[in-house]
Image (cartoon, helix red, strand yellow):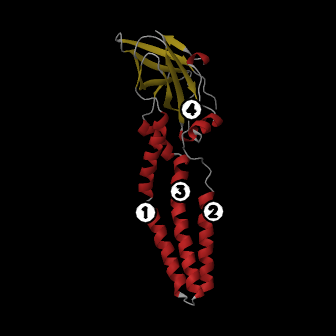
Amino acid sequence: MTSSIQNKDHRLLCLVLIITFSACAAPLKTDTVSFKSPVSYPSHQEVEGLHLAIDAIDSVDRSEAIFGTDLKEANILPIHLIVHNQGTKEFEINALQVFGITASGEITAAYSLQKSAEHVRQSSIGTTAVTGAIAGAVAGAAAGAAVGAAIGGAAGDASAGAASGAAIGGATGGVAGTSAGLSDSFTMRFKKELAALAFEDRVIYPGDLQQGFVYLKWKPYQKIRMKLFNITDNKVHELFFPVAVHR
């Protein structure tokens, strides 16, 4: 009887481990970004000494190199914005005033960081991360229960196996009950990762070389529209950058 229960515990542990290691979506983990001067990009524009360029991160390789995963899985298109102020004016760029424009003239606003994080959480990237965390917790509980069953069996106490089964059931239920909390914590983690590379609202002072990402809904845009504010002269510039989105 004890041997049969122990075998069931072992099978359950193996099943949990298979689930843990069968996830396929890569985790979101940002890294240092390499880039060129704005004048090196086909989209380059110059406004009163401020050089600007945008670059759509639309390939799997480039997305994984920067974000650790393919953000298309979350329906997000990262737009890399690079600026170099070689003039004497101060400028401001508001990321929420960046829009993607398709061939039909459809205009789409950039996501906020919160909305971007929510899309990652709802995608296979987020599902894999949360499932892995839950499966890891269950695997730990199952491993402990299996050890307890083995000790009980060696001591000739058949009830130990039953106790371990109850422990596994309780741990599994407890972990499942915390899945909503894990979901919230992962959304916060995704937001922090995306924020680490986000452009957001920036003041670009004379001599500054700055870069960051704006997150758009994935669509075949042909233009990116941006509002540039000249703080020094209190002037607004509306800029349009050509872009080609592949895949």
The image position of residue 182, as x and y in percent, is: 44, 55
Residue for badge 3: 131
Q: Position of residue 8 (x, y in %)?
A: 61, 77
Q: Quadrant of residue 67?
A: top right
> How far apart are labels 2 and 1 at the CA level?
21 Å
Q: Is residue 1 visible?
A: no
Residue under label 4, please give it: 33
Residue that protrudes farthest toward the bottom in the picture: 156
Residue at the spot of label 1: 177
Q: Is mark 3 in CB contact (under 8 Å) with mark 2?
A: no
**Cβ atoms at labels 2 and 4 below 8 Å apart:** no
The amino acid type, in three-letter code, at marker 3 is: Thr
> Which residue, given by chain and number where applicable, does mark 2 sit on?
18
Please state if 112 lies on the left or on the right of 146 as rendered: left
Q: CA distance from mark 1 to mark 4?
A: 38 Å
In the depicted structure, whether residue 135 falls above or below residue 185: below
Please name the residue shown 49% across and 73% down the image. 169
Q: Secondary structure at mark 3?
A: helix
Residue plotted at (42% across, 34% down):
112
Mark nearer the viewer, 1 or 4: 4
- Give the secondary structure at mark 2: helix
Quadrant occupied by the N terminus? bottom right
Quadrant containing the C terminus is top right
What's the distance in space between the residues labelled 4 and 3, CA to CA? Answer: 29 Å
Q: Position of residue 177 (x, y in %)?
A: 43, 63
User: Please, what is the three-letter code of the amino acid marked with disc 2?
Assistant: Ile
Kind of element beneath mark 1: helix
- The 10 Å Cα crowd at callout 1, few under 14, some 14 to 19, many 20 or more, is few
Q: Which residue appears farthest toward the left when viewing the image?
A: 234
